[in-house]
Image: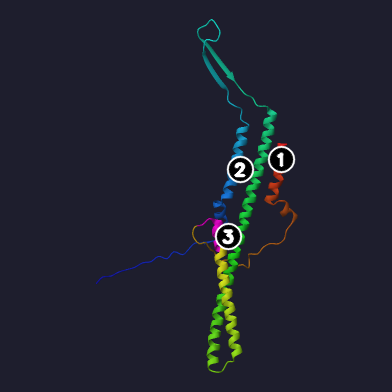
Amino acid sequence: TVLLSFSATIQSQKKYSLKECIDIALANNLNVITAKLEVEYLKQLKKTSSEIPKTSFVYTQGQFNTKYKYDNIFAFSQMIPNPFFISSQSKLYQSQITGSEYNLKAVKADLIQDVKIAYYSLLHAQSVTRVLRKEDSLFSTAAEIINKRYEEKTENILDKVSVETKLLEIRNELVESEEDEKTFELELQTLMKEKTNVEIGDESLENNYLNLEVSSAIITEHPILSFLRQQVEINRHIK
């Protein structure tokens, strides 16, 4: 007697929350990475610009129009930059650093907005698909019953056509909704730079709504406007 045992482990695909999608997108986005590197580069540039150059030393040996066969010449030099120039350069670099930081915030804000739109669009499409599948099941059952009654001469042709037409509409809408799901999932996957399909968590749309209240403070503090204001400040220092 041979006893064979088989074991199978089914691993469910990870479901991402909105925060996880945003974090992954920010970590993998090339524009964000480039903006971060620019900030670090300007900080290092500002640091080195305020450093005083090292003292240089030159030693020369030989006869230089003197009675001595060998002359030893020692030369020391030290460059001291103009303090007003250093101060001006420091302010310019600081303005550029601030501008690059605002640019980084603006790039992040745009990416986060794109991820949110793709995420909630996918979530909405999934909700619509679930509703349509339930309706498809209900009207399929209803169509079977009415067709049976019609064959038995207990149902008229108008009811039969009406149910079949409604069922066809639902199935067309279902196909469109499933295509929307694929589109938004691919968009989210692209934003996250993921190689495999992205599956989001089962969240309800009831508590996820857009706040349409816009105040002047929100507008003036937007990263893009802050970045543009800082560009004006940088140009002022350059002039």
| Picture residue at 60% right of the left edge, 64% below the top | 120
**Is the Cβ of the residue at disc 1 closer than 8 Å to that at disc 2?**
no
Q: Name the residue under label 3.
A: 18
Q: Residue furthest top?
A: 67
Q: Which residue lies furthest to the front in this view?
A: 65
Residue 229 in sight from this viewpoint? yes
Q: Name the residue under label 1.
A: 235
The span picked out in magenta is: 185-194
Q: What residue type is labelled 3?
A: Leu
Q: Name the residue under label 2.
A: 39
The picture quadrant where one finds residue 100 is top right
Give the secondary structure at mark 2: helix
Q: Residue furthest right?
A: 216
Q: Where is residue 239 in the image (x, y as percent from the top left)?
A: 73, 36
| Picture residue at 62% right of the left edge, 48% below the top | 104
Foreground label between 3 and 1? 1
Label at residue 148: none
**Is the Cβ of the residue at disc 3 closer than 8 Å to that at disc 1?**
no
**How many C-alpha atoms fall within 10 Å of the one at disc 1: few (<14), some, or many (≥20)?**
few
| Picture residue at 59% right of the left edge, 49% below the top | 32
Earlier residue among tags 1 and 2: 2
Q: What residue type is labelled 1?
A: Asn
Mark 2 vs mark 3, CA separation in Å: 27 Å
Q: In this view, does 161 lie above or below 217?
A: below
Foreground label between 1 and 2? 1
The answer to whether residue 193 is left or right of residue 89 is left
Earlier residue among tags 2 and 3: 3
Q: Which amino acid does label 2 sit on?
A: Val
